[in-house]
Image (spheres, rainbow, N blue to C red):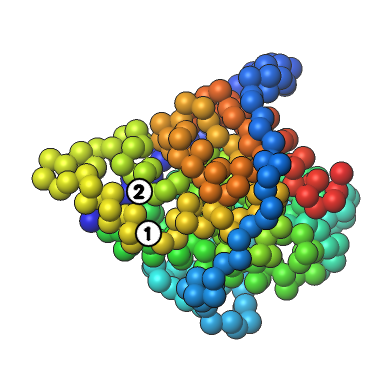
Amino acid sequence: MVRWQGERAPRSGYRPAGSLLTLLGAAALLSSSCAPAGLSRHYTGPQDMPREMLTYYDYPKRPVRAKVAVKAQKRRYDILQVEFPSALNVFGKENIKIDYYVGREEGTPGPAPAYTDRRPTVLMLPISGGVDFSVESFARLFVTHGINCALVHNRKVRIKETQSAEEVEAYFRQTVLDNRQALDYLVTRTDVDPNRLGCLGLSLGGIKASLVAAVDRRIKCAVLGLAGGSMADITMHSKEHGLEEYVHELLALGVEPALIYGELKEKVRTDPLRLGPYLDARNTLLFIAGFDQVVPTWTGQQLRQAIGDPQTIYLLAGHYTSFLYLPYAQWQSLSFVRKRFGMN
């Protein structure tokens, strides 16, 4: 009964203006306005996920037969388009689609017939609008520093188009299923180190990354940008225009707020707060915007507590103005991931 309205992606034609020195100066100024918080000294480790929950996120195991094509070739890396069908569809029937950024030695002609340098690899989960320049900029930075990246596309049917709490649950469960199968494909590649896998997401992608990292223990580190929970709290308190407008429409029809909230709270099982305790806080980096009204700041705090108070960086910004911190967030994320993978 609740229709989700997701955030809007920035215009695809946008390009940052100004000189490199200006950008570096701005990054330095912004970084001085961040407030880091370290991992809780009392943290003892993640909870073990019950067997019935693991079964809920399981799917038929079968060899992944992917179609792979070259999308672009750069001096130090290639971008491959990867596509294969899901073994289980609970929301839509689309294929799983990945833009795979794979590094190669500088000067090596590409694409090589086989990439053999096993590297750490990170799943990257985009915002609700899909793969945009911000997610791609993380991938470009990571791959040029020795970390392959797999940008897993959202399904065409967006969460904002769901019509009920049951559909919201199916959407998030499918996200977990798709990304677990993306990992299945990656570990078969000769260029992937199966013992050094991570995930990173921004906004809705950060919420999804928290779910995937909680369910699949192959993920050894997670970076969650502007994420929060629960989905019921975000739905009822977000100031995102489309979502706020739709909730107001339901209220005008006489639907009680408690009913909307209760439906989501009860039926959305694949929720950041419910799965948070199964994340390893020692291997999690969280970014929270101090004035976020889209994913309200206090829901980010709820998620932090559910995980076990992981290392957190507070940004002096709102949800969309956090874009100003993008270069800073990229380098902090890269440093965190490299350290967790023993690359520093």
Task: Tell me the quarter of the picture where residue 118 sits.
Answer: bottom right
In the displayed structure, does residue 283 sit left or right of residue 134?
right
Residue occupying the point 87% across, 53% down: 105
Q: Quadrant of the N terminus?
A: bottom left
* SS for callout 1: loop
Alpha carbon distance from label 2 to label 1:
8 Å
Residue occupying the point 64% across, 26% down: 35
Q: Which mark is residue 128?
A: none
How many neighbours does mark 1 have within 10 angstroms: few (below 14), some (14-19), or many (20 or more)?
A: many
In the displayed structure, does residue 333 sit left or right of residue 108?
left
Residue 196 placed where, x, y %?
77, 59
Is 110 situated above or below 234?
Answer: below
> Is the C-beta separation of discs 2 and 1 under 8 Å?
yes
Q: Nearer the viewer, residue 35 or 91?
A: 35
In the displayed structure, does residue 158 sit left or right of residue 74?
left
Earlier-in-chain disc, 2 versus 1: 2
Q: Which mark is residue 268?
A: 1
The amino acid pointed to by label 1 is Val
How many neighbours does mark 2 have within 10 angstroms: few (below 14), some (14-19), or many (20 or more)?
A: many
Residue occupying the point 47% across, 56% down: 274
Per the image, the residue denoted by label 2 is 232
The amino acid pointed to by label 2 is Ala
Q: Quadrant of the C terminus?
A: top right
The answer to whether residue 331 of the structure is visible from this angle is yes
Is 242 situated above or below 265?
Answer: above
The answer to whether residue 202 of the structure is visible from this angle is no
Residue 21 placed where, x, y %?
74, 17
Residue 256 placed where, x, y %?
17, 46
Count of marks, rendered view: 2
Residue occupying the point 85% across, 66% down: 116
